[in-house]
Image (tube, coloured by chain):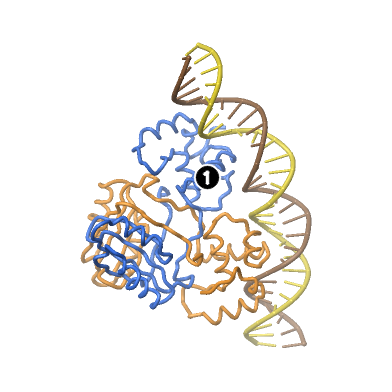
Chain colours: A orange, B blue, C brown, D yellow
Amino acid sequence: MHSEPVASRSADPRDTKDSRESRNGSRNSTPQLDSVSLAIIEQLQEDGRRPYAAIGKAVGLSEAAVRQRVQKLLDQGVMQIVAVTDPLTVGFRRQAMVGINVEGDTESVADALTDMSEVEYVVMTAGSFDLLAEIVCEDDDHLLDVINKRIRALSGVRSTESFVYLKLKKQTYMWGTR
Amino acid sequence: MHSEPVASRSADPRDTKDSRESRNGSRNSTPQLDSVSLAIIEQLQEDGRRPYAAIGKAVGLSEAAVRQRVQKLLDQGVMQIVAVTDPLTVGFRRQAMVGINVEGDTESVADALTDMSEVEYVVMTAGSFDLLAEIVCEDDDHLLDVINKRIRALSGVRSTESFVYLKLKKQTYMWGTR
DNA sequence: CTCAGAGCTGCGAAATCCGCAAACATGAGC
DNA sequence: GCTCATGTTTGCGGATTTCGCAGCTCTGAG
C-alpha cells in the first residue's frame, strides 16, 4: 500500500474507524489492524526497543496511546517483540526444512508438530507438500531423531522430505518498510 | 554479588574464556559467543523489551555490562530486536515458499534473491532443492509476478516449485529456552 | 437523550537508560 | 616477575522513558 511519510492524518480517530471497516474481512481469528497500528508495527520492526514517545511522534499519537496499542497488540498475539538470531551462530548446528504429506486431518498433524520444541515454524501449504516445518537441532543425531522417530511416527504422516540447511542467506522482518 | 539461578558460574570471566576457546570453530564470519551472551539472548528472546537491569540480575552482570553486550551483539549483527507478526494479519495476503534448482553458482542466485524486497528468507539447502526462499506478497498478481517474472528470470535458475501458504501454525523465536 | 464502552491525552512518580571515569583481568613483550 | 595495552565490568548521576490514573471525546445502543 502506499504509505506516506507517516500517518499524520491518522491522528484523527475517524480515519481509524473508516479504514477498519473498509478492510474488515470478518476474519474469525484476527481483529484487523488500522493504519496507525500498522505504522506502529513498522516502527517496531525497525527497532523493537524504540521508545513509545518516538513512535508516537512518528505515527501522530501520544506516548500513552502508543503504549496502550502496543500492549494490546502483544496481548492479542498479533505481534511479539523478540530477539532473533541466526541459530547457527547460537550453537544450533543443524537445521532443516521438512516437507510433509498427510493423509487425513492435516491440521491435527500440524498441531502435533507445533507441540515439539525443536519445531520452529509450521505452515500449511498448497502444492506438493501439505505441511512445511522448520526444525532446529543441536547436531545430526538430534535432527535425525526428530525427523525419523518423532515426525514420521505421527499418525497421518504419509511421507516426508528433508532439506538440510547449509547456509542462511537472508532473514528479514521488515514488511511494510519497503 | 554472585548468586542467581542462571549462569552464576559465568560471572567468572575465566569461564567465558574457556567456553569460547572450547567451541571456537574458527568461523570466519561470527565472533563466537560465550555463555553469558547466550543467556542474555535467551532473555531477549522471551521479551525483547526486558530492562537491562532485569537481564543483569538473571545472568549475573551489572546493568551497564548487559547494556554494552547487547549493543555489541546488535552492532555485530549477531542478533536483532524486532517486532514479528504473522504477515497474513498485517495485510500481506499471499505468501509462498519457493524451492529452486540452480545450475552453476548457487550463491550468486541466492544473492540476487536476497536483493528482492519481497523475499523474506533465503537459505541454501542440501536435498532436492538448492535454495529455499520465502516470498511475502500483497496479492496473487504480485506473487505471480515475483515468481514467474523475477525469480525464474534469474540466470542460473533451472526450475522452481512453489508452496503457497494456507495457514501459519507456529512461529517461535525461543531456541535455548527449551 | 442518556448511558456504557473504547480510545486518546496529559501529568506526576517511579523505573530505566545512557555516558563516563575508575577498577579489574588478561595477554604480550621484555 | 613487571609493565603496558586492551577489553570488560562496575558504580554513579542526570536525562529519558515507562507506568498508572483521571478526565475528555466520540460512537453506538437502547
Q: Quadrant of residue A36?
A: bottom right
| Left or right: A146, with B77 as reference point | left
Name the amino acid type tagged 1: Val
Tag 1 secondary structure: helix
Where residue A113 appears, as percent x and y from the top left, is 33, 61
Q: Quadrant of residue D18?
A: bottom right
Where residue A49 appears, as percent x and y from the top left, is 57, 54
Foreground: B142 or C1? B142
Foreground: B69 or A17? B69
| Residue at x 58% of width, y 71% of height | A4
Where residue A159 appears, as percent x and y from the top left, is 21, 64
Q: Is residue B97 above or below residue B21?
A: below
Q: Is residue B161 above or below residue D26?
A: above
Mark 1 crowd level (few <14, some 14–19, many ≥20, 10 Å Cα): many
**Given the current orientation, which residue lies at the most extreme front position?**
B155
| Residue at x 67% of width, y 75% of height | A12
Residue carrying label 1? B70
| Left or right: B75, with A64 as reference point | left
Chain letter of disc 1 in the image:
B
Where residue B111 appears, as percent x and y from the top left, is 36, 58
| Residue at x 23% of width, y 60% of height | B103
| Left or right: A38, with A155 as reference point | right
| Residue at x 46% of width, y 60% of height | A173
